Image (cartoon, grey):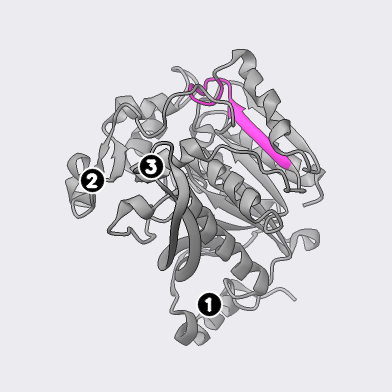
Amino acid sequence: MHRSLFSVLALFSLGSAATHPTVTPIRAGCVDLRLPIRASATNFDLDVTPARRTERITGTFLMQFVFCEPTVRNASRADTLLVLSPGSTYNTMYWDMPFQPETYSFVRRASVSGFATLNVARLGDGKSEHPADPEIVQLPLQSALLVELVRLARTGTLVPGKRFRTVVGIGHSLSSGMLNDVILTAPDVLDGVVLSGYAHVSNGQPLAVIPGFFPARTILPARFGGLADGYLTSDNITTRSGFYGPAGTFDPAVLQFDEGHKDLVTVAELASFGIDEVPAPDFKGPVLAVNGNFDRSFCPAPLCANLLDEPTFYPKAKSVETTVIQGSGHDLNLHLTAPVFFQTILDWLDRNGF
């Protein structure tokens, strides 16, 4: 039976003694939530060469996520949840852009297609906790936290009274790498994945050394002055424009908005991202890989031919589809072709029975 968001909020209040969530309505049908999540992971020892995945870490971290109910009901999708996560230096705005949302918000497009969404800020990003030691903020810990979030969603703990039987992960760039780690380490947790702005075969540039990324406390001291040097952001709008295609593929006002709302990534996230591009041999759900043809990092080969290698990394997957969005750079959500990208995801979800 469908519960209104009002009743869900009431249930959060009743359950707060156990979970202590902070619940903030942000618009009709959507709530911003903060919830402590406990997870364990084996991170990389980044002080040795080559780095080894030997550093065991266990902790409880305050995570931010935005839950939105569908605005159009579809009985076949009543128990389906799309879990969204952004790439480096982006927060929950990436999948739910407040600037011209009718064009740039995937959350709103999914909502009118009958999907509930859980828009997650990574650890060290957005309004999620920023650990004092940024070196622990690596892909293995990020993926372990996401696994716990999905398990809570399936049991009805994350959204009280609502159990999601089907969960699809949708990532961008760094978070696509995180999802790859999820389906490697916990192949039964997600029913399907969409990996955008990502490929196992890239341009080979070391991700831990990205030109124009500097300690965020020196770039935006008013926002990030209290953080350690291991938290990075881009230095200016010129660097930011590297995530975009050439002039004419995006609205300059979107780039300006993006620059004004940029967020964080840790050195350790980028370093572990570069190491952790490995196969997920036991994942059996469908996979969709999507890149923009102007993506400098993950579409280096002519016509993005490197995407043709992706099926080899998911040998047991139900299917592996690859798509190139013409007229888009790395940030597919922020180009004029964003509606094409969003429809590509929705069509894939429909084809796969989600």
Q: CA distance from mark 2 to mark 3?
A: 15 Å
The residue that disc 3 covers is: 89
Q: Is 215 in front, or is 290?
A: 215
Q: Which residue is mark 1?
A: 9
Query: Marks 3 and 1, how far apart in space?
Result: 30 Å
The amino acid type of the residue labelled 2 equals: Asp
Left or right: where 15 falls relative to 281: left
Q: Residue sitting at 71 percent across and 43 percent down? A: 281
Q: Amino acid at mark 3?
A: Thr
In front of the other: 102 or 341? 341
Whether residue 343 is visible here, answered yes or no, is: yes
Inspect the image, locate mark 1, and give the three-letter code of the amino acid beneath it.
Leu
Question: Considering the numbered disc 3 on the image, is that residue within a helix, a strand or a loop?
Answer: loop
Residue 46, numbered circle? none
Residue 293 shown in magenta: yes
Give the residue at the far top of this rendering: 302
Graded by Cα atoms within 10 Å as few (under 14), some (14 to 19) or many (20 or more), the crowding at tag 3 reads: many
Residue 317 image-quadrant placement: top right
* Residue behind mark 2: 229
Q: Image height check: is 44 above or below 16?
A: above
Q: Earlier in the sequence, mark 1 or mark 2?
A: 1
Question: Which of 228/105 is in front?
Answer: 228
Secondary element under disc 2, as helix, strand or loop, is: loop
